[in-house]
Image: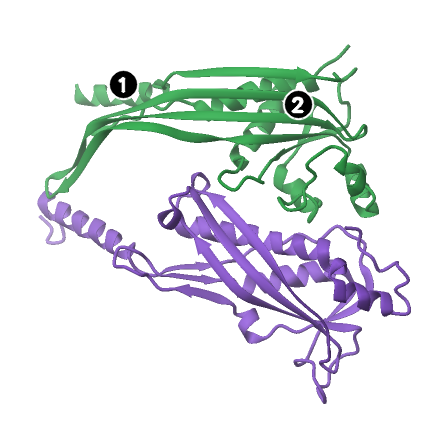
Chain colours: A purple, B green
Amino acid sequence: MSGSMTTAPERGLWLAALVLACLLAGCGTKQVVVESEFPDPVMNPLPLTLGIWYDDDFANHEFFDEASGRAESSWLVNTGQAQVELWHTLLRGMFRQVVFMNGKPGPGQMNPLVDAVLLPSVDELQYAIPAHTNVKVYEIWMRYRFQLVTMGGDPIAEWTMPAYGKTPTAFMQSDEGAVRLAAIVALRDAGAHFATTFTRVPQVEAWLNSLPRAGGQAQVLP
Amino acid sequence: MSLRLLLMGAVLLPWLTGCVNATVDQMVFNSPTAGIGDASVVILGRRHASDYETEPGFISCVGGHIEARDPSIRVIDELEFLNALYPWFEPRTAPLRPSDLEKLFEHRDVAEKFAALQTRYMIWIDGSTVRGDSAGSMTCGIGPGGAGCFGFGTWSDDASYEATIWDISQRAEVGRISATASGQSYMPAVVLPIPIIAPVQGTACDSVGDQLLEFLSHTP
């Protein structure tokens, strides 16, 4: 007999060890990297050149929730890459031209010429899984903060906007897959919410009306 | 002998299913006077409720059921439609009433997309399949000599769906179909668990699909 062969009891022990290892791994940190492609919005672009500045916190946005007990898992949800993908695709479809800034707008900062600069950030992210709520739904809730500023960094408008996504348990096999899908739904919701309400933010509306060329044609129908 | 039994089991297992009861109600206010011709149909799931969502798998099942039985009907894939008309059919922005379509069509780009897709009917399906009561117990063990399960489990599933048909050209609701199905599944286990699953969602899918097919394939 070859020395590398194992007997049936040995194989059973290895199998038991493997199952135990898998069970123990379930108590570690669950990491979710949200990646997705987002569709171009179907809308008449606003006749504006918009600058965008993503700070590092936004472009590499991640959310970490440490387990409160030994029976629970810690969660690390990384949405940065998907955030950039979503907002780039959405804004490119919402405005005539979108330009990435070289630096955060402010006095003395050299940047391309634009009508205004949008600075998005994620104020808060919360998640819920069936183990927390006893409801068979995975949920992601986000609150964005947007700042619309001039090239010199002077504020034009600042507002917050919620976004929500959920996935029933039946759709997915793993917690990670369900949280990832809920995050993608939340990101799509964020895009839909922004696209349909941007021109109705009172400060933005006032700014658009103050532009000499706006004349009503810059309006996105609600 | 045991090999023959295993082979018989493998052949018979897929045929072991639980019983399902299904009920279908249909209300058609305005039947089509002809088949839909070159036009297409889109079937969308309602996802507004906080505690459930219409399963994307159910939507594609109904679409597949219709296309398989009448290949002349073109059913647009749900995700393809949602992406083609983003952001106007997301849960937050989707029209809730046929009259809301009027406002949506004020967007020139949206109207052009609909024209390109040649969508005649929009069918909204709202509902879900939920796991009901369960009973029994099963113990599984693993040891150096092998692994196995022993016990018996049973559970019920209930499906409830409502399909609402909108005629896009008339901006009107032209029909409503509801289907409910319930069934009991069993899983006895003697070493190996033997699932006897009641195809509750599949039965509901067939019921809704058959009724929609009758509506869409209507010819005078």
Q: At 17% from the left edge and 52% from the top edge, which residue is drawn?
A: A17
Q: Which of marks 2 and 1 is nearer the N terminus?
A: 1
State the separation of the CA atoms marked 2 and 1. 37 Å
**Total numbered circles:** 2
Q: At 41% from the left edge and 50% from the top edge, which residue is drawn?
A: A129
Q: Residue B8 carries which label?
A: 1
Q: Please provide percent x and percent y for residue A138.
A: 45, 48
Q: Which mark is residue B71?
A: 2
Q: In which quarter of the image is the N terminus of chain B?
A: top left
Q: Is residue B6 or residue A193 the one in the foreground?
A: A193
Q: Is residue B190 above or below residue A32?
A: above
Label 1 secondary element: helix
Q: Please provide percent x and percent y for residue B191.
A: 18, 30
Q: Which amino acid does label 1 sit on?
A: Met
Mark 1 surroundings: few (<14), some (14-19) or many (≥20) residues within 10 A:
few
Q: Is residue A37 visible?
A: no
Residue extending farthest to the front is: A202
Q: Is residue A63 above or below residue B132?
A: below
Q: Quadrant of residue A31?
A: bottom left
Chain at numbered mark 2: B
Q: Can residue B69 be seen in this view?
A: yes
